[in-house]
Image (tube, rainbow, N blue to C red):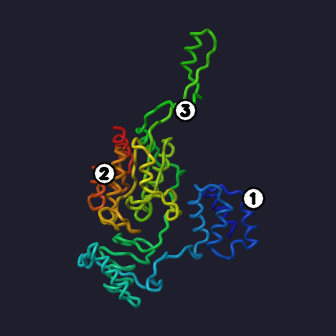
Amino acid sequence: MFLAFFTELRAAKVPVSLREYLSLLEALDQDLADKSVEEFYYLSRACLVKDERHFDRFDRVFAHVFQGLERMGQALGEAEIPEEWLRRLAERYLSEEEKEQLEAMGWDKLWENLKRRLEEQKGRHQGGNKWIGTAGTSPYGAYGYNPEGIRIGQDRNRNFRAVKVWDKREFRDFDDSVELGVRNMRIALRRLRRFARTGAPEELDLDGTIQETAHKGYLDVRLRPERRNAVKVLLFLDVGGSMDWHIQAAEELFSAARLEFKHFEHFYFHNCVYEHLWKENRRRFDEKISTLDVIRTYPSDYRVVFVGDASMSPYEITHPGGSVEHWNEEAGQVWIRRILDHFPKAVWLNPVPENHWSYTQSIALMRQLFSGRMHPLTVEGIDHAMRELIR
């Protein structure tokens, strides 16, 4: 099993040496993993991975090789609802006619009723329409259906209707070394270029050398600063949830942007920007970056590109507390406007096909906030977005 782990890491282009593999085996002989799956995960990562950029590939190989072993972390985070209530016994699938008969409560009533259920509920429920349970039409629970509810104890999206998710969710960073499937994506990004010669004079100025040599009668070597793209770019990447369907396109753009721009920074968010951003998804709860600090740190001459499907509950944009994962004191649209006020050159790239945008209310809201500066995440869309940023 461990040899297969080693060979698959090499196949996934994680630069693991034989010496590091032997170090892992020696550590296992010393029982440093303490017979714990989680301890073995961290031990093997410490022994075999030398660069944080390879963490994501390591995680994927680890999950594949050791499939079936107990997953690390608590499924419900800090939720106090007993786990046995949330076990799925039967998923309920409704017809379109049955779905249309269900009505959304609205934001205020949804929270008011949840508080009441938490106070009153004493046992596990399944298949109903009121209590926190499974496989029913209640707004609270898992593996059922409601047009607007709070998802509790479900491992993935099923209907994309939840306005809050009461679970601990793990996202993965985008890989910035992906080989682009479409070379034209990089060519489209090159429209956003303004060259300038800055820094130390280290590059041979051939024309200047010839001119000065001819003028002075002896060899006079001239140097000049390297010609670089002076455009500065901030990339804000939506990650997790429905964006999992668009990982390849987002990673290709991420890779292209890192190659094309010398002055480049990226930040992650989920669904909508709020008071915090992060640089690494595995540490997003521990190493948060204040959005206000980002606004204060980077001057307004930075070009800003948002990448996301903008597909979420409208409450995440319009209401305080609307974030699907935490209680935000200010609505998402307040933070979007703060960013756009500071960075006037900003666009949104959306991986959802443009002909589907009119079906999603949150896309319309985000497009309105960006004054129509939303473009599809295609080569043509990127080209139009870059033209907009250099106006």
Identify the image quadrant of the C terminus.
top left
Counting residues from the N terminus, which is met first, the one under dot 2 or under dot 1? 1
Task: Report helix, strand or loop for mark 3.
Answer: strand
Task: Report helix, strand or loop for mark 1.
Answer: helix
Label at residue 199: 3
Which dot, 3 or 2, sits closer to the camera? 3
Examine the rendered structure and indicate whether residue 73 appears above or below residue 211.
Answer: below
Which dot, 1 or 3, sits closer to the camera? 3
Quadrant in which residue 117 is drawn: bottom left
Residue marked by disc 1: 19
Looking at the picture, tell me which residue is in the foreground, 310 or 92: 310
Examine the rendered structure and indicate whether residue 292 appears above or below residue 228.
Answer: below
Task: Report helix, strand or loop for mark 2.
Answer: loop
- What amino acid type should be assigned to the residue bearing mark 2? Phe
Badge 2: few (under 14), some or many (20 or more) residues near its Cα, within 10 Å? some
380 sits left or right of 102 in the view: right
Whether tag 3 and tag 2 are in contact, CB under 8 A, the answer is no
53 sits left or right of 367 in the view: right
Residue marked by disc 2: 370
Q: CA distance from mark 2 to mark 1?
A: 53 Å
Point out residue 21 in the picture as x, y percentages from the top left corner.
72, 62
Q: CA distance from mark 1 to mark 3?
A: 41 Å
Residue visible at 60% across and 66% down in the picture? 62
358 sits left or right of 158 in the view: left
Quadrant in which residue 149 is drawn: bottom left
